[in-house]
Amino acid sequence: MFDYDHYERLNRARGEVVTRLLAELKDALQLRTAMDIGCGVGYFSGVLQSLGFAVTGVDGRRENVEEAARRNPKVSFHTNSVEDPGLRSLGTFDLTFCFGLLYHLENPLLAIRHLHAMTKSLLLVESVIFPGDEPAMVLIDEEIHEDQGLEHIAFYPTEACLIKMFYRVGFAYVYTFRQQPNHSEYTNTPETRRVRTMLAASVVPLNSSHFELVKEPSSEIRPWDARIAQVPVTAAQRLRRFASKPLPDKLKTIQRIMKER
C-alpha cells in the first residue's frame, strides 16, 4: 500500500521540504535524536537516519514495524499507539516527527499531549485537514484499508484546530510553512481545495525563513448560548447537504425554493 505511486510522489514532495529544513535547523537547534511517530514502513525514519539522526520509529501496526525494520536495520522500531500513555516510556527526543497520522485518531488532542511530553525542542507535523476556519474537528468514518486508522473512525481537525491544540498542550511557538510541499494536495486551485498542511511546534523561537509564526486561533461561537446567531453556512456546505439528501427530500427542497421565488 505505502509503495503505491501516490505515496511515492507525496513522500518525495514532503521529503524535499524536510531535508531542506533540517539541513538548516539540525545544528542550529542541536537536534541529534528523532522519534518518527506513525512511521508506516519507515520511509521518513530512513530519511532522518540518512540526515544523521539517531532515530526511533513507532507504528500501531506490527506488520508495518516489521517491514520498517527490514528496510532500516539501523533504526530502532516499536509497536505502539500514539494514543497510549505507555508511549512516553520511550523517552524524550530532540525532534518529534509525526506525518500523516493525527487525522486517523479517535483522540488527537490526547496524542498531541503525548507528543509534547516527548519533544525536547521541535515537533514537525503533517496532516490532512478538514475544511473551515474554525478550530474544530469532525468525526469521520474512514475506509477500511491498511493505510487508515486502527479503528477506522477518526476526528479530522481543521488547520486552526491543530494550531490551537499545539498551543494548549504547552508548545510556546507554532508555525506554518511559508512554502508547502510541491504537490497538488497542498495547493488551492479554482477546481480543488488544499487538503493537507505541514506545521511546526517548538519550545523555543525559530529564526528561519521557512516558517511564519501563527497565533492561537479563537472562536466567537458559543454553542451553549441560544442567543448567538447561527453559524454561517457556505454555499459549498449547502450543496453538500443537498447532495446527501434522498431524492424525495431533494424534490421537496426544490419545490420550496420555487415557491419562495
Image (cartoon, rainbow, N blue to C red):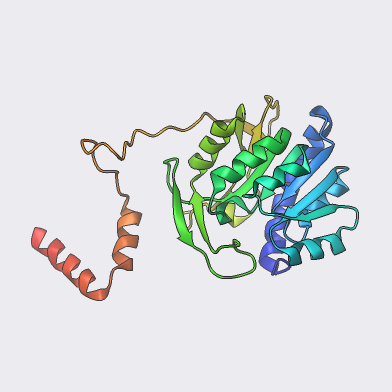
Q: Is residue 191 visible?
A: no
Could you say where residue 28 lies in the image, as x and y percent from the top left? 81, 28
Residue 153, image x and y in percent?
51, 61
Apparent side of residue 48 relative to residue 149 in the rendered image (left or right): right
Say which quarter of the image contains residue 100: bottom right
Quadrant housing residue 35: top right
Q: Residue at point 52% right, 28% down? A: 215
Q: Name the image quarter holding the N terminus.
A: bottom right
Near-viewer residue (187 or 250): 250
Q: Is 132 placed left or right of 60 in the picture?
A: left
- Residue 132 vs residue 35, the one in the foreground: 35
Give the farthest residue toward the right: 74
State which quarter of the image contains the C terminus. bottom left
Camera-side residue: 49 or 213? 49
Which residue lies at the image location 70% right of the left edge and 51% below the top edge? Answer: 14
Residue 109: percent from the left, percent from the top?
55, 43
Q: Position of residue 130 (x, y in %)?
A: 48, 51
Q: Is residue 165 above or below residue 63?
A: above
**Looking at the image, which residue is at 29% across and 68% down?**
245
- Residue 68 in view of the camera: yes
